Amino acid sequence: MPSPLEKARQDPDSMKARILASARRLFGEYGYSSTTTRMIAGDVGIDISTLYYHWGEKLDLYEALITDLNDEILLKFEEVEQRARGKSLSERLDISIDILTDYLFKHPEVSNLILFGYFNKAGTDSVPDIKIGDYTSGIAVAMDLAKDKAHVPVQAKARILAVWNCVLNFISGENFFRPILNVDHSNYQKVVKETVKFMMVPAFTK
Amino acid sequence: MPSPLEKARQDPDSMKARILASARRLFGEYGYSSTTTRMIAGDVGIDISTLYYHWGEKLDLYEALITDLNDEILLKFEEVEQRARGKSLSERLDISIDILTDYLFKHPEVSNLILFGYFNKAGTDSVPDIKIGDYTSGIAVAMDLAKDKAHVPVQAKARILAVWNCVLNFISGENFFRPILNVDHSNYQKVVKETVKFMMVPAFTK
DNA sequence: TTTTTTTTCCATCAATTGATGGAAACACTT
DNA sequence: AAGTGTTTCCATCAATTGATGGAAAAAAAA
């Protein structure tokens, strides 16, 4: 039998799925504590108790959302690995940056949710972490910085994290940075990609 | 006559200053909406109404805090400019990274407060922004990427922002990244510095 | 149609939040 | 000591929050 989360994913028109989608957008926009269950219910167009009927308490909904997001990101990273496999290093870098920045620009709430997670005290929460560690090692192998996931040098991991964080901040902070750079949205995307590629090449080709 | 903020800064033992210090730490740790005025008052060891007597509403306190922080960061950037002036490029890079990362590691709430600011909807808030744009141009001139602050190429600004953001995230997300890199705090600082320097050199020497 | 199950909403609760009025305590001047 | 102004705290308020019980409505089964 399918889990509640799987059920919600299977039928995107189901109430559970609609609530999850709104929750994801709003939690991503305002953070956990600034997003009220009433805001989410209002966004879906339902009463607050309907939300509680489907998802139980607020934290459960948030956990489901993070789990969902984790799987989605993992899938994206697998796509990167697959499409980069066999290509030259410079092509691998290009492909991975293109896929990831396009994905994050298309779903800006993802960057926010990940960044919000950084502030959580470790262990204090029962909320599942975004599994950045796994992704990082995967990318390291895909970029040929390590032979297998278990033996990635700390420097390689740190450089991947640096680039990854850089992308996240550029996307979450677009409203902040775009006036500084004085470009429109489409040019902003271009500048971000250029900048990231520019910094990534020497980091992974030496 | 000194402004309230100046007064608080002049005498760090004054009640206003003590409240400001606690507020800075707590807002930096939990964000604006998750930090209650009762938490701050409790941290100082006073009644909540004493806090209101000195600072008025919560948002005023937060604004004062950000203004204070802005001045402090500006001072740090001026220190960087001053101590980097006349040195060779590689020395300038070393000095600026050392000063900034040491400062941020010593005051981890600063990174958090800046990052929290990224999420604010532009214009929605009356809270004064952290003036990253000014700092960025200043650094660009100090690094000799531009002749004057008014004519900094967009690529140069973007690269400075990238490095700056990278540092912020490494510091705010230490609890998150340190287990991934599997190092202790002191080695973490070392790795962060190394990584940032490693990525900065090619970004500013080409 | 009738019965049963599932879903939705209204009303409400207790706890927490930002905020204030007013009394008490304190400090300072005369 | 008496008077004056400042600072602190207690008690309380209205609004918001997460959460629930139970009635009504809708859907499914009989």
Image (cartoon, coloured by chain):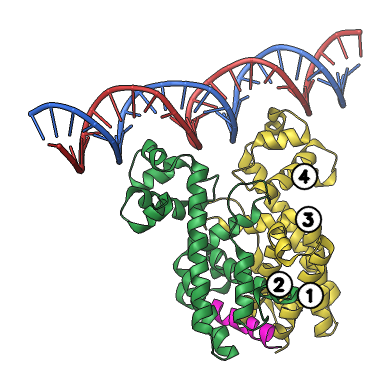
Chain colours: A yellow, B green, C red, D blue
Name the amino acid type tagged 2. Ala
Whole-angstrom CA distance, mark 2 to mark 1, is 9 Å
Q: Mark 2 touching mark 1, by CB under 8 A?
A: yes
Whole-angstrom CA distance, mark 3 to mark 4, is 12 Å
| Magenta-colored span | B191-206
| Image quarter in which the C terminus of chain A is found | bottom right
Does residue B52 sit above or below A104 in this rendering? above
**Which comes sooner in the sequence, label 3 or label 4?**
4
Secondary-structure class at tag 2: helix
Q: Chain of mark 1?
A: A
| Image quarter in which the N terminus of chain A is found | top right
Task: Give a yes or no on whether discs 2 and 1 share a subunit.
Answer: no
Task: Give a yes or no on whether discs 4 and 2 share a subunit.
Answer: no
Front tag of 3 and 4: 3
Per the picture, the main secondary structure of the magenta-coloured stretch is: helix
Which mark, by number, is residue B168?
Answer: none
Disc 2 target residue: B158
Q: Chain of mark 3?
A: A
Asked if residue B196 is among those painted magenta in the image, a careful observer would answer yes
Residue A61's x, y, as percent? 67, 42
Q: Residue at x 52, y 50 (%)?
A: B63
Query: Quadrant of the rendered structure where residue A79 is?
Result: bottom right
Q: Mark 4 touching mark 2, by CB under 8 A?
A: no
Is B140 situated left or right of B48 in this image? right
Name the amino acid type tagged 1. Glu
Whole-angstrom CA distance, mark 4 to mark 2, is 32 Å
Is A62 situated left or right of B53 in this image? right
Q: Mark 3 touching mark 1, by CB under 8 A?
A: no
Disc 3 target residue: A107
Badge 1 crowding class, 10 Å Cα cut-off, few under 14, some 14 to 19, many 20 or more, is some
Name the amino acid type tagged 4. Ala
Disc 4 target residue: A21
